[in-house]
Image: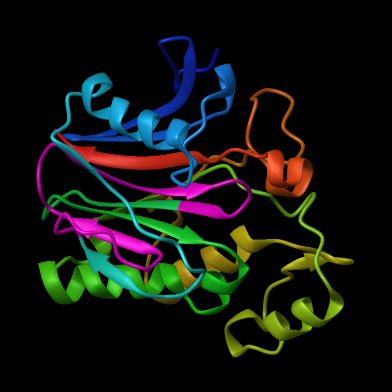
Amino acid sequence: MSDNDFKLKGYEFLKFKEDNAEIYFSTARGDLDFNKNTQLGLKNINKLKNWFNLERVGYLNQIHGDKVYKYDGMIYDGDAIITDKKRIAIGVFTADCVPIIVYDKNKKVIAAVHSGWKGTIKNISIRAIEKMIEDYNSEVKDLKIYIGPHNMGCCYEVSEELILQFKSLELYKDIDISIDRKLNLQKCILKQLWSIGIENNQINTLNICTFCSKKYKLHSYRKNKEESGRMFSFVFIK
């Protein structure tokens, strides 16, 4: 077990701490499923309040876009959620897409971002950080970023047309974002973060592939199709 493995009720999470913020990436150990479109998923989301001593858990109806919302207790259609409220977890659901957690260590603001290929091509990570800067006066130098388990460049096979769509963008012209038909979304997201001044020492990449990881049991839609559950990547301020 690594230093970041956290066991709870027979389930397994990857845990990280930043000052008074805690960051968790759920796994599929114990068949833990956070699919909010099922009764089991909603029940497990609600359990987080007791497990982690939280008042509420905030999330969105994810639409693979670039809409960013401040948490206000409502559930919106979007892919990034932000708050500065204590004891409220905010998170995103994934089963191959990229979960990104952002923490402003100075202003004590947190964000959870869902970045599939559509969100990535729309720069959802940049949109979320811009919202933190605009609404909370965050500064890029104060941010810590966590990129969680996802279908990585080793396994994420897409169409040649999609790879060309990414490569046609100016942002990616000077980096190699694919091998054959396997697209590396993490490289694209890293380039987005670098483009707005975030340094490598501010970024923690877990480098865990949902499709081929042998160390962790993870939900993967590509592997298990409709039978796949959902993981929940979340952060809260204590």
Question: What is the count of numbered marks?
Answer: 0
**Left or right: residue 103 compared with residue 224:** left
Name the one closer to the observer, 221 or 104: 221
Which quarter of the rendering shows the C terminus?
top left
**Left or right: residue 13 compared with residue 105:** right
Name the one closer to the observer, 202 or 45: 45
Please tell me whether residue 86 belongs to the stretch shown in magenta: yes
Residue drawn where x is 29% and y is 41% of the image:
235
Which quarter of the rendering shows the N terminus?
top right
Q: Let me know if residue 76 appears in the view.
A: yes
Name the one closer to the observer, 174 or 75: 75
Residue drawn where x is 48% and y is 51% of the image:
99
Q: Is residue 204 above or below residue 113?
A: above
Q: Is residue 41 above or below residue 172?
A: above
Horizontal and vertical percent position of residue 3: 45, 18
**Left or right: residue 157 compared with residue 88:** right
Residue drawn where x is 42% and y is 67% of the image:
125
Q: Is residue 107 above or below residue 120?
A: above
Magenta residues span 71-99
Horizontal and vertical percent position of residue 43: 37, 30
Horizontal and vertical percent position of residue 140: 27, 66
Residue drawn where x is 72% and y is 68% of the image:
177
Q: Let me know if residue 209 appears in the view.
A: no
Q: Is residue 21 above or below residue 132?
A: above
Horizontal and vertical percent position of residue 36: 43, 44
Name the one closer to the observer, 204 or 29: 29
User: Residue furthest toward the front?
Assistant: 39
**Left or right: residue 38 compared with residue 20:** right
